[in-house]
Structure formats: C-alpha cells, structure tokens
Image (spheres, rainbow, N blue to C red):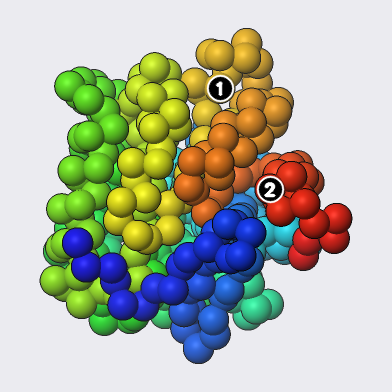
Amino acid sequence: MVVPPGHRSGRNNDGVAVTRLVLNSTVLEVDGPLLVGVLNATPDSFSDGGLFRSSKEAVERGLQLVSDGAHVVDVGGESTRPGALSVSLGEELRRVLPVVSALAAEGVAVSIDTRHAEVAEAAIEHGAAIVNDVSGLRHHAMREVIARHHVPVVIVHSPVDDPSVMQQHSQYDDVVAAVVDFLRVRIDEALRAGISQVIVDPGIGFGKTTAQNLEILRRLEELSTFGVPVLVGASRKRFIGEITGVDVPADRIIGSVVAHLSALDRGASMLRVHDVRAHVEAVRMWQALRTGSTHSLD
Ligand code: HH2
C-alpha cells in the first residue's frame, strides 16, 4: 500500500498523533486529536435534526462548535441514520450551501458530509475544504471531483450506498476484515484517481449491529495498517444508548466520550463529535495522562 503523498500524519515524541491536512491555501496541523464538530442542517438527523431551522441558526451553531474547540465543522444536509429517507439534490444543496459559505467566510475549516458528487463540488466552490464521503468513495464522479479540487477525503465504510436499507446489510463473517478490505480497495482507487489526502473511517453504525460496532472499536488498531489518519464517529449513536441505557441521543455524552477515548488509545487521530466542549476536556485529560505534561492544550 502506498501512503498518499499529501500526508504527513505521524506521532510526536510523546506518541500522540499529529495530523496535517492541506486545506485550500492553508495547512491545518493539529498536535493531538483533531476534533470534527457535527452540524446537521437537516430536519431529521437522529440527535440534532430540526434544531437549526434557518441557515443563520446553523451558522451560529457552527461558530459555537469552533469556539468550543472544534478544528473542523462537518456540515450535512441529508441524514444517514438507519432508515432515513433520501432528499433531492436541490434540497440538499439548499440546506448546506449558505451554511458552508458563511462558515468558510469566517475562516472555519468546513467539511461537507455528503454522498453526492454534485453536492461535494458545489460545497467546495462555496468554501468547503474537506469531503466527508459517507458512501465510501464508491462513485467515480466523486473521486473525480475530489482529485480535481485537491481536497482531502474521508472514506467512510458502509455496506451499501443507501442509508435507508443499510441496516439490512449487516451480515459479515468478520466485520473488521470486511471494513479493512473495503477501505483498502477504496484507497487504491483514490490514489489511482489522483487523490492525495485520504482519511479512513470504519463507519460506526453504518450497517452494523451493536456487537459489530464494539468489535470494530476493540480492534481499531487494524485500521492503522494504511498509514493514514483514522477518524471515528461514535457520537451519540444508538449502540451507545443500548449499552448505557440512555435513550435520549443528546444525553449520551459520557458513553460517546468513553468510546472515543478508547478509539484514541487504539490509533484514531480524528473524532467526529456533537459535544465538542466535553470532548475537549476529555482529550486534554487523555493527552496529559499519556504525556505527563501539565500544560493545558489548545
Ligand atoms: N456518522 C454520521 C454522519 N456522518 N461521517 C463520518 N465520517 N463518520 C460517521 O460516523 C458519521 C458521518 C451519522 O451521525 P449524524 O450526522 O449525527 O446523524 P445523521 O446522519 O442522522 O444526520
């Protein structure tokens, strides 16, 4: 496996991951876990759907995520929750573009959470700097857009492209092997298409049972074989509710933090989270325990 050339993701002297992404004309380098704040401009996302009815409210939320400590804000206009109905391209664009451009104008590093090449391209043209492809970079058109605009891509494992049926596809002999094999193929395709910055994500909850999500988190080191940053998004997901007994997604903060700290211990360097403040605190403590440093982190 060839490591994509745009990367210099490694470990510092304390063994903590350093992530470096080239975004438009700037470089985002984070010495320690990189936090991606979730911003769903949707009426039906499982934990924050309908909260930000206007673009203005969504932008305010995005700026709040940054002041709380998010390094990147991930803007999505279509829910991927199991069973979610797909929206038209026009509607997805209408939801995300004003939010992307307003945040980018404020200097925020924005990623666009989509499975559609048209939405990715329009969002990039409005200032998005990363594509979070929740369909796993399956489509040639998406690879072509990302390569042409030289933006980093998050490749998310999902057994099928369509969220409305993905829970019917959770049969794997070995879920971790299936995720690793899938990502290996997609990374090779990305490199062949000329994409130089790749981040991988096992797709927690994307066509997976609670037991499979746990198996992935327990064996997350197996994703380090690619030598590219590993992103984990367990935030508020249903399996956390099942394990902790916390029914309301927005109340699943402790379970989310614990899952994410475990992911950091097993090689993740990026976390996609709704509750940024709680994760900043948790990550500071995690990093201090690893390094012995008493300095508070930026
Ligand atoms: N999970 C969701 C959406 N996008 N992107 C990445 N890279 N990794 C994830 O695990 C991931 C993701 C689902 O969570 P959320 O955005 O909160 O909900 P919804 O899809 O209902 O909008």
When asked about the image quadrant of residue 63, the answer is bottom right
Q: Is residue 161 left or right of residue 133?
A: left
Q: Position of residue 24 (x, y in %)?
A: 47, 83
Residue at the bottom extreme? Answer: 25
Q: Residue at x 70, y 28 (%)?
A: 254
Near-viewer residue (53 or 15): 15
Q: How far from the left and from the top, in percent, is residue 291?
A: 71, 53
| Relative to 203, residue 215 above or below | above
Secondary structure of the residue carrying tag 2 is helix
SS label for mark 1: helix
Residue linked to disc 1: 240
Residue 103 occupies quadrant: bottom right
Q: Which residue bears the numbered disc 2? A: 290
Q: Give whichever of 11, 211 is nearer the camera.
A: 11
State whether residue 122 appears in this view.
no
Name the disc covering residue 256, or none: none
